[in-house]
């Protein structure tokens, strides 16, 4: 992967398919819903999957905003995390070096972070980094939002019921899933968000800019990270499609949220992803656009409303082969 500075702005969408699954539960363990009953997922759910994918597949990359534990299995504090990652105490570090260290972490180069340590003499070292990659909440664009709950049996009895008739019975719990959903996350990439920080820390020997290598890993994670993140609650949730619209380097155009422009429906047991309205935007801004890439699995989904041409290319999301 090339390690050159990435300067282009990008707009796009990541579409996540969830079948009999619960991709992003609320604190009651139900799928999250908007006031009108539409299921949604937070940007944090997708970012977690992306960081987990990078951690497992690129172990040489530093990640900062991830949960770590001490010997008592308690989560580390912010200053403990900094000391663990960089092997130095915050109070002994100048703010410029602190910034350089933070930007050596790929998750901060991508998503930014609010670094606000607590304690005497270190509160003045607060730094807020507006990351180049911004991801909106994912909204289920499938017409139905059917949520169901099923009982499950635990292999253990409840010791709190020794005096009741249930003392010899196993515990009964439940789990709640979404029958079918297709979450559409809009995202944007704007390298200028962190440009002022690069200017503060860059020198001839070391630069912590957003690189083409970072973008290649981000794009790979957009295509694979959720599928890769299997758990008992997330099994059945997979990366379905990614749309990547890269502007020319000097373009100042802003594209609207793709979440509002994409429709998803089912026909003959195959998902139909309608991006006709996205195509209308692309047509109007053709001279501003460098390239458009669409990733999906044609045996499972159809992409409607976008025709392949010199700028627009389609790839299989499973192996990146051109369609």
Image (cartoon, rainbow, N blue to C red):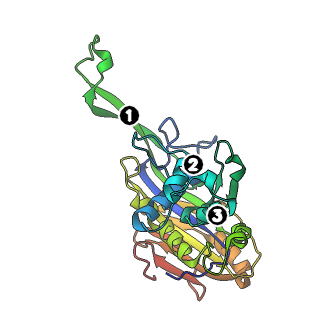
Quarter containing the C terminus: bottom left
The one of 310 and 191 positioned closer to us in this rendering: 191
Label 3 neighbour load within 10 Å: few <14, some 14-19, many 20+: few
**Please, which residue is most extreme toward the top here?**
163
Are the two marked residues, 1 and 2, in contact with CB atoms closer than 8 angstroms?
no
Disc 2, SS: helix
Image point (50%, 73%), residue name: 295
Residue ID for mark 2: 79
Label 3, label 2: how far apart the Cα atoms are: 15 Å
Q: Position of residue 313 (x, y in %)?
A: 54, 82
Label 1, label 2: how far apart the Cα atoms are: 38 Å
Q: Position of residue 26 (x, y in %)?
A: 52, 40
Q: Which numbered disc, 1 or 2, marks the residue closer to the eye?
A: 2
Res 289 → quadrant: bottom right
User: N-terminal of the two: label 3 or label 2?
Assistant: 2
The one of 93 and 288 positioned closer to us in this rendering: 93
Image point (53%, 83%), residue name: 2
Q: Which numbered disc, 1 or 3, marks the residue closer to the eye?
A: 3
Q: Position of residue 61 (x, y in %)?
A: 48, 67
User: N-terminal of the two: label 1 or label 2?
Assistant: 2
Q: Position of residue 80 (x, y in %)?
A: 53, 48
Residue ID for mark 3: 97
Label 2 neighbour load within 10 Å: few <14, some 14-19, many 20+: some
Number of numbered discs visible in the structure rendering: 3
Q: Is residue 269 visible?
A: no
104 left or right of 67? right
Residue ID for mark 1: 174
Res 3 → quadrant: bottom right
């Amino acid at each position: 992967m090339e390690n050159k500075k990435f300067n282009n702005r990008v707009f796009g969408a990541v579409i996540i398919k969830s079948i009999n699954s619960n991709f992003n539960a609320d604190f009651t363990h139900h799928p999250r819903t908007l006031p009108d009953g539409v299921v949604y997922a937070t940007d944090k759910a997708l970012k977690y999957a992306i960081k987990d994918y990078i951690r497992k597949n690129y172990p040489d990359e530093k990640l900062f905003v991830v949960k770590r534990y001490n010997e008592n299995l308690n989560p580390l504090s912010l200053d403990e995390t900094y000391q663990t990652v960089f092997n130095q105490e915050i109070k002994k570090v100048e703010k410029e070096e602190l910034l350089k260290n933070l930007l050596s972490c790929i998750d901060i180069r991508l998503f930014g972070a609010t670094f606000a340590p607590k304690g005497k003499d270190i509160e003045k070292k607060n730094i807020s980094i507006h990351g180049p990659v911004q991801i909106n909440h994912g909204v289920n664009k499938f017409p139905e939002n059917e949520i169901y709950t099923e009982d499950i049996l635990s292999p253990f009895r409840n010791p709190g019921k020794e005096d009741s008739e249930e003392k010899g019975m196993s515990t009964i719990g439940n789990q709640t899933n979404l029958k079918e959903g297709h979450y559409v996350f809009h995202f944007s990439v704007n390298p200028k968000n962190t440009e002022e920080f690069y200017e503060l820390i860059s020198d001839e020997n070391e630069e912590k800019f957003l690189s083409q290598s970072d973008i290649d890993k981000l794009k790979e994670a957009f295509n694979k990270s959720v599928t890769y993140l299997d758990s008992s609650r997330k099994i059945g949730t997979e990366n379905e499609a990614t749309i990547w619209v890269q502007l020319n380097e000097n373009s100042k155009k802003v594209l609207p949220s793709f979440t509002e422009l994409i429709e998803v429906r089912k026909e003959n047991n195959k998902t139909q992803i309608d991006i006709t309205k996205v195509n209308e935007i692309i047509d109007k801004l053709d001279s501003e656009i460098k390239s458009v890439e669409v990733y999906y699995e044609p045996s499972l989904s159809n992409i409607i409303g976008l025709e392949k041409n010199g700028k627009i290319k389609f790839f299989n999301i499973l192996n990146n082969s051109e369609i």
